[in-house]
Image (tube, rainbow, N blue to C red):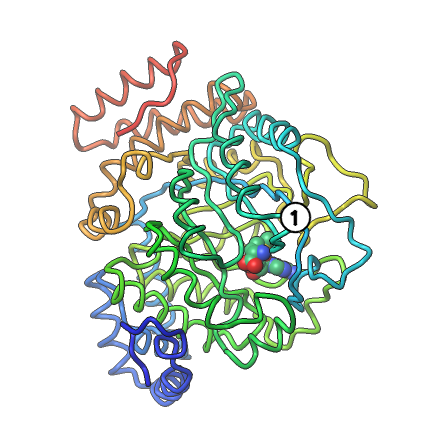
Amino acid sequence: MYNPKSNKAEEFIDNQEVLDTLEYAENNKNNIELVDKILEKAKLRKGLTHREASVLLACENKEKNEEIFALAKEIKQDYYGNRIVLFAPLYLSNYCVNGCVYCPYHAKNKHIPRKKLTQDEIKKEVIALQDMGHKRLAIETGEDPVNNPIEYVLESIKTIYSIKHKNGAIRRVNVNIAATTVENYRKLKEAGIGTYILFQETYDKERYERLHPTGPKHNYAYHTEAMDRAMEGGIDDVGLGVLYGLSTYKYEFAALLMHAEHLEAAHGVGPHTISVPRIKKADDIDPSTFENGIDDDTFAKIVACIRIAVPYTGMIISTRESKECRERVLELGISQISGGSKTSVGGYYEPMAEKEESAQFDVSDRRPLDEVMHWLIDLGYIPSFCTACYREGRTGDRFMAICKDEQIHNFCHPNALLTLKEYLEDYASPETKAAGEKLISKELELFENKKMAEDVSSKLKLIHSGKRDFRY
Ligand code: SAM
């Protein structure tokens, strides 16, 4: 029985409710009157229910779809302006005891080199990431209680935060590790993590169990209720996502929004971010064998509909996607992207020989970070390395309250300029530096609050003279 407040996976992601939602959406996909009504509600920027958003996703009317894309762009602009936050993944270990059918780290893969970074290797990787200009990492591991116990993850986080190389610093470590206990989530919170990210992979229980035939991840309820345990452990910024291609995208979309509604109903705060990964080629994985792959147009529609349904939730796209695909969805709702990524264990410090390659999936966007920065600036975006909210305690419901009031600009915009300036001073190529300085000057002129503009200007001068880490 569907109950968004329940702490049972099968009640807050009730299969029948998802199926009824899909039927409702199918029956109403050309009901222009209803689509218009939903769009009117969406314009209030307070979000939509999973049923309403599913109707928009299913809608096939060309004109209405154009309205959907236009509204997504407007909402993106209202909540996130032209800022794009950057991060990099850091793979610590690919040891894994699970049998995930889509992932090359599955335990039966005997020819992929298994690797776990030592603390010394982590230091080298982090220095290489700092030297690129990164300030925010997402750490990733396979699930293996012997090789990657929580103690290893905690020690690695401590190492990462402790490294201060030249002007570099990692100021926020997000964590993407397997579902764990409340006690372990509490330890991660105490270690100072930013967001806890866990992809659901698929919300369809029957399919989930088939795709995770062995290992602890087989347990659907334990995986699906992970965010509840994370919140119980004190982590109030959690990141959701499904791996598109595993099940039908309409099912995943409705269930993902039901998960967001559940977090809000049960904990008073929705997800901090939603990621939109699509299944990619990898060592012994061929994406074409998964029957539910989605094309770029459908992918763009999903991004737009998520943006409209949960305006205050950040949206992340990784280098799984190509430059062209990323460019298209940036304006539709994406607020965070990775750049200059390596998806193998090690490889930032020293590029790997092919036979040592342990990449989790093929990266489509292989451009170095500086090229990504220049590209964003040329597109009119402000690349941001801001980590201020979480360091100022603006997390969970505090962050959401500021976000829902559309006040987040007052912090994010100046912080984006300040962190961009740090990048330009410390790491940019001459071309990126020139383009970035021009962008900062232009942005300063656009400030409505002239006092704030003066304050930001004086901080920019201090950064130029060597000071670092200002934030609002
Ligand atoms: N091992 C952790 C867990 O069990 O949740 C998460 C870390 S894993 C390194 C990060 C994510 O990569 C997975 O949750 C999955 O969605 C994604 N992934 C796995 N195989 C992939 C593939 N072939 N293509 C694209 N993404 C993939």
Left or right: where 207 falls relative to 101? left
**Residue type, label 1:** Asn
Residue found at x 33% / y 53%: 76
x and y percent of residue 34 in the render?
26, 82
**Along the line of sight, which residue is nearer the eye, 429 or 418?**
418
Residue found at x 26% / y 61%: 267
**Under tag 1, what secondary structure?**
loop
Say which residue label 1 marks: 147
Say few, some or many: other residues with alpha carbon within 10 Å of mark 1 (under 14 / 14 to 19 / 20 or more): some
x and y percent of residue 140 in the render?
57, 48
14 relative to 421, above or below: below
x and y percent of residue 88 in the render?
54, 40
Q: Quadrant of residue 411?
A: top left
Q: Quadrant of residue 303?
A: bottom left
Residue found at x 38% / y 18%: 468
Q: Is residue 442 visible?
A: yes
Left or right: where 321 falls relative to 230? right
Figure quadrant, ligand 1: bottom right
* Quadrant of image for the C terminus: top left
227 relative to 162, above or below: below
**Along the line of sight, which residue is nearer the eye, 77 or 463?**
463
Within 8 Å of ligand 1, the CB of disc 1?
no
x and y percent of residue 77 in the render?
31, 49
* Quadrant of image for the N terminus: bottom left
Q: Quadrant of residue 380?
A: top left
Question: Extreme top residue here?
Answer: 465
